[in-house]
Amino acid sequence: RKEVEQDPGPFNVPEGATVAFNCTYSNSASQSFFWYRQDCRKEPKLLMSVYSSGNEDGRFTAQLNRASQYISLLIRDSKLSDSATYLCVVNYYGQNFVFGPGTRLSVLP
Amino acid sequence: EAGVTQFPSHSVIEKGQTVTLRCDPISGHDNLYWYRRVMGKEIKFLLHFVKESKQDESGMPNNRFLAERTGGTYSTLKVQPAELEDSGVYFCASSQDIPGTGRNTIYFGEGSWLTVV
């Protein structure tokens, strides 16, 4: 089993739709959780850090369920510019960051 | 404040040649990481420095790869001799632990795109 798993995707949604991505992790000692977005041929960029049960930033909401070892990302009112690959990243303090395989999102006009 | 910088941004070399990639982390960041993404695969961890020490090098694929971080500042990743399967993008990242919080965030450079022909 992979350490971090994500919805396989791709997700193709119309503009204005709400889309949710799921991520599960296997290391119960994981402490920090993040969502990064990666555009084609670019580096991953931090979208949101998730430290408690969840947080919201504009159209983006991340939720964390430590008991189920599950993280989600909800994007509301999706824009064309949201098209990217979304990476779930998990970290145990002082150790390396482990990446999920990513879920590709295409927002269609 | 400057972000993580990497050099070269692109490199095309022949099989058997040597390439050295350089990474300058964000100033003051003790943690420096190397990751690699080969075509169609996910981002994979290579190694982690804390200052000048190798904290974890479990992801290094074989002894053709050598990473250094002399003085705890910039790092180099040398591939010698390069093979075709080494082609991909090599990302460097840095972070700084926030004492007492168990938190840190990783910031990436733009990557060094390596093509071995």
Image (cartoon, coloured by chain):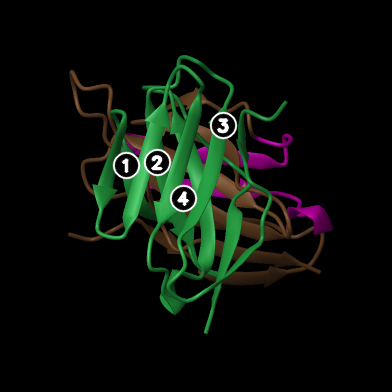
**Which residue: 68% across, 50% down?**
A8
Q: Are marks 1 and 3 in contact (CB under 8 Å)?
A: no
Task: Name above or below for residue B116 compared with residue A35.
Answer: below
Q: Earlier in the sequence, mark 2 or mark 1?
A: 2
Q: Is residue B10 magenta?
A: no
Residue at the spot of label 1:
A49
**Which residue: 65% across, 35% down?**
B60
Q: Which residues are magenta?
A: B60-86
Q: Nearer the viewer, residue A25 or B6?
A: A25
Residue at the spot of label 3:
A24
Asked which secondary structure carries label 2, the reply is strand
Determine the colour of chain A: green
Asked which secondary structure carries label 4, the reply is strand
Residue A30, percent from left and from top? 44, 21
Name the mark on residue A34.
2
Name the mark on residue B74.
none
User: In which chain is the residue bearing label 4?
Assistant: B
Q: Quadrant of residue B28?
A: top left
Residue at the spot of label 4:
B92
Q: CA distance from mark 4 to mark 3?
A: 25 Å
Residue B3, percent from left and from top? 29, 58
